[in-house]
Amino acid sequence: MKKTILLAVFASVSAFAQKTYIQCGNLIDTRNQKVLKDMTIVVEGNKITEVKNGLHKGEKTDNVIDLSKKFVMPGLIDMHVHIESQTAKDQFQKRIQYSEADIAFESQKYANVTLMAGFTTVRDLGGSNVNISLRNAINRGSVVGPRIFTSGKTIATTGGHGDPSNGIGTKLSLQEEASNGVVNSAEEARKAVRQRYQDGADWIKITATGGVLSIAKNGKGPQFQDDELNGLIATAKDYGFGVAAHAHGAEGMKRALRAGVTTIEHGSFLDDECIALFKEKGAYLVPTIIAGKTASDSAKIPGYYHPFVVKKALETGVLIQDAFARAYKAGVKICFGTDAGVFPHGYNAKEFMYMTEAGMPIMEALKAATITNAFVLGMENELGAIEAGKLADIVAIDDDPTKDVKALMKMSFVMKDGKVYKK
């Protein structure tokens, strides 16, 4: 009996001690923005324990993964996704018809596709509480997907971008719980933040201006008053939340920046005063260029969007890349984010193409999608780089992205938390 127990303990200790040696022909150092030749990453459990010069194999009992012909980098981070849904001609109809169970099953598919595209971590900015349950299921290992930081439901104003009743006739009604993120005073804004805390959200998402895809006429006007923003953001800070503000129009952007938001999403109509406020306040721009371009293209398909949306998509979509270019060249801090769901999930890396077209070098764009995003998430000690002590989120592609940015669209290896999901 004692012998059996000892053997079992020895076997478990041996399994725990087993290491994985990942041989990297080209290791992209996103912190220092350079490519290192012939390196080996040593992984134990879910963490990187060592990064060594040369190609090593370890002991006979250790695993070896040969990526000597590939370009290896940290798992990518997308700071703006909507993993519960995906663009479609009947998307509005689905929003009315689908139950939370329907949404949950769909979201698992989108989560899997996102991870296989090399995005091992995402920040989900607005959906239902399915987001929170999906995050928990992925963390438990019940569902395959990226590590999720979620805002749960968006906080909006009546009729504003994010009000779930937009476009629904007066004969239909929503459950009261569906609209618990619609606020119209500083006190209601504070209460909504506290509700997100109780729900288990990681971030707060607000809609500081109108939006493109909501069925409402104005896509850029401000939608929160200063007292509402101040009450909301002060409460968010008390509860340890960062605040992401959807903002297309300049005035709403300025109000959100003055109030102290962490990130501005989109920034389509930013002006010089907005740029100055970004730099003064230390806020980050999440450009989502691919979303603007996709919405503009979809608006040209007859019947794809509501007429209100068509007009806004055609006006806004063509501006977003230029807005990013001006902000980047002026020294605004940039996070990589795409608004996945506005375009089909899994194409997130196409954003790198648009960022480089607008003047950001690919190595800077990769840094934005790793080092910078990890810092903004408060995960700089765990994510964003291939370094000893960090979580083993490691991805690889076949070709050199510094020579062909499109190479990032073809992910050939994905490890998240020390587990291989694609090879």
Image (spheres, grey):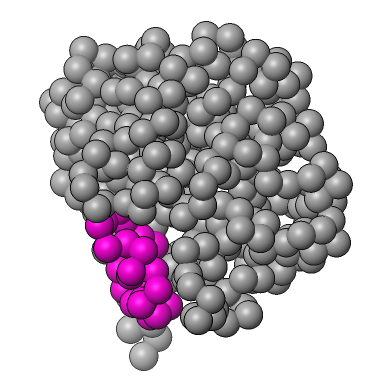
For residue 324, above or below residue 183: above
Q: 300 or 259, which is in the foreground?
A: 300
The answer, for residue 350, to whether it is visible in the render is yes
Query: Which residue does the image show at 31% across and 56% down from the upper left?
Result: 86
For residue 228, above or below residue 58: below
**Quadrant position of the N terminus in the picture:** bottom left
Asked where in the image residue 64 lies, by quadrant, the reply is top left
Compared across the picture, whether 401 is left or right of 295 comes to left
Q: 119 or 49, which is in the foreground?
A: 119
Query: Which residue does the image show at 51% across and 34% down from the upper left?
Result: 266
Residue 225 spot, x, y in % from top left: 79, 45
Give the mark count: 0
Query: Which residue does the image show at 33% across and 23% down from the upper left?
Result: 354
Asked where in the image residue 359 lies, by quadrant, the reply is top left
Compared across the picture, whether 39 is left or right of 409 comes to right
Asked where in the image residue 375 lies, by quadrant, the reply is top right
* Dominant secondary-structure state across the stretch colored magenta: helix
Residue 369 spot, x, y in % from top left: 44, 31
Magenta region: 84-106
Q: 358 or 39, which is in the foreground?
A: 358
For residue 239, above or below residue 269: below
Does the stretch in magenta take in 197?
A: no
